[in-house]
Amino acid sequence: MSEKFALSQDSGPGKGTAMKAEVFLPEDYIPAEDEPFMNERQVEYFRRKLQTWKAELVAGSRETIEALQDGTRSIPDVADRASEETDRALELRTRDRQRKLVAKIDAALRRIDEGEYGYCEVTGEPISLKRLDARPIATMSLEAQERHERREKVHRDD
């Protein structure tokens, strides 16, 4: 299967007018262990996965904001009002976690742009494709993450 490339002018804030090759992927493409690690197709696959995930989170945040603005009504029953406030607080906590997730997605996209994506920040070794597919914001290999969590647990128990 041959890779298709198209040149596109990339412009926007901080982008300048650099030309970049755009990789076209079949819709059913899944990175495979038998291809070179972080080749153009894999990088584009993860870039699109991250961008789609971010767009979904941002759209959900907009819906929450609209719902909260529309839902500012006076509820006479104290129990109903308390229930609605609890629901709102839960929704806001969820959106706050998602806001932090968007920041991690942005960091992963920056690592892609810098050519560092897919490599463990501790060991420099490649992160497995299965791990990246399951958690595309991963910054450590599974082994390094487990060591980190064990050290964290030891320090918490002190």
Image (cartoon, rainbow, N blue to C red):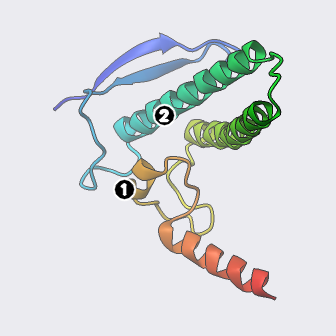
Closer to the N terminus: mark 1 or mark 2?
Answer: 2
Residue at the (60%, 25%) spot, across then down: 60
Position above or below: 54 against 13: below
Q: Amino acid at mark 1?
A: Lys
Residue at the (47%, 12%) spot, across then down: 8
Position above or below: 114 against 15: below
User: Number of callouts in the render?
Assistant: 2
> 84 and 44: which one is in front?
84
- Image quarter for residue 122? bottom right
**Image x and y of residue 109, in percent:** 59, 37
Checking the image for residue 17, the label placed there is none
Residue at the spot of label 2: 47
**Image x and y of residue 61, in percent:** 66, 26
Secondary structure beneath label 1 = helix
Circle 1/circle 2 CB separation < 8 Å: no
**Image x and y of residue 30, in percent:** 28, 41
Residue at the (59%, 21%) spot, across then down: 59
Residue at the (59%, 17%) spot, across then down: 18
**Is the residue marked by circle 2 packed among few (<14), some (14-19), or many (20+) residues within 10 Å?**
many
The Cα–Cα distance between marks 1 and 2, rounded to whole angstroms, is: 16 Å
Q: Amino acid at mark 2?
A: Arg
